[in-house]
Amino acid sequence: MPSKTEAFFGSVGRRVILFGRDVHYASKIINDAFYWTFVSPVKGKPVRVRATISEIVKAGYNAVPIVAVISLFVGIILALQAAYQLKRVGALIYVANLVGVSITRELGPILTAIIVAGRSGSAFAAEIGSMKSAEEVDALVTMGINPVRFLVTPKLLALMFMLPALTVFADMIGIFGGFLLSTTVIGIHPYNYFQQSVNALLVKDVMTGLVKAWAFGIVITIVGAYQGFKVEGGAEEVGRRTTASVVASIFLVIVFDLFFTTLFYYFT
């Protein structure tokens, strides 16, 4: 029998090999997705426009109600919490600054990404995983159709376009929520709140959020596709991979948010 030391290093080695395989498979999906999205159309192989529009409707338009409700509530909560602290120093007018900058730079992109990861990222993993389980992906390969081009590219384009658009919408609704609470409960004059928000917000604040949202869209799509293509079993495996896609997407969204926040802090 192997000793405890051999068993330990053997376990570590197997985990490292599995991790290396996962990284290689993920990098292959990323490479194929970007090739079929950006390089292939230049070489005369266009993307599936109808499928992309369908994904835009499902991932973007259908997410508008839930994004609006959550953003409105977050704006109200943020204004209420800011007013609780700022009224101690007689600076209630700066509620507008805090709400505007916090939502555009941070809360708008990340909350929208989490909502989309729960809605669309899980749907991507479930759809591709179900096709993989039913051997439909193998059928695509047999017919000479690249599964990444057929399944992933429309989803990637849809989220790259719709996540920034949803973020702008979430920013506006969130700021409106703060405006609504501040002008009704706190007693700030609407014109003063508007002017304070305009003076506080800069173009780089909005652009920071949009760059984050664009990157989050790529992350959510790639994670959903990766988990879907990794399905090797029946319905139970599809459910497990779908759950894993949501968890991994939210984790990576926060990691990328930290990266971009640090980057913009030092270089803007």
Image (cartoon, rainbow, N blue to C red):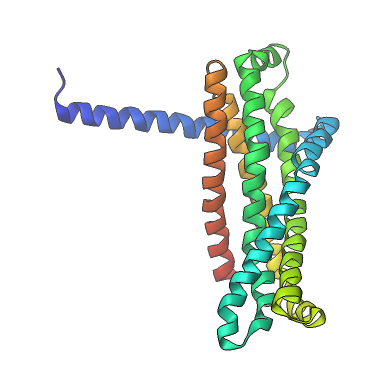
Q: Tell me if 254 is positioned left or right of 52 in this view.
A: left
Q: Position of residue 21 (x, y in %)?
A: 45, 29
For residue 230, above or below residue 166: above
Q: Quadrant of the C terminus?
A: bottom right
Q: Tell me if residue 8 can be seen.
A: yes
Where residue 9 sits, quadrant-wise, is top left
Image: 181 above or below 64? below
Q: Is residue 164 left or right of residue 15?
A: right
Q: Residue furthest bottom?
A: 90
Q: Is residue 142 above or below residue 43?
A: above
Q: Nearer the viewer, residue 261 or 148?
A: 261
**Where residue 15 sits in the image (x, y, percent)?**
35, 31
> Residue visible at 76% across and 40% down?
158
User: Among all residues in the image, which is located at the extreme front?
Assistant: 185
Pick the residue in front: 158 or 22. Answer: 158
Residue at left offset 69%, top offset 31%: 152
Q: Quadrant of the N terminus?
A: top left
Q: In this view, does 20 lie to the left or right of 252?
A: left
Q: Can residue 208 be seen in this view?
A: no
Task: Please tell me which residue is depicted at 63% across the width and 20% down the height of the picture.
Answer: 130
Q: Where on the picture, by quarter, is residue 35?
A: top right
Q: Where is residue 264 in the image (x, y as percent from the top left)?
A: 59, 66
The part of the image, by quadrant, that contains residue 188 is bottom right
Question: Percent x, y for residue 90?
Answer: 61, 88
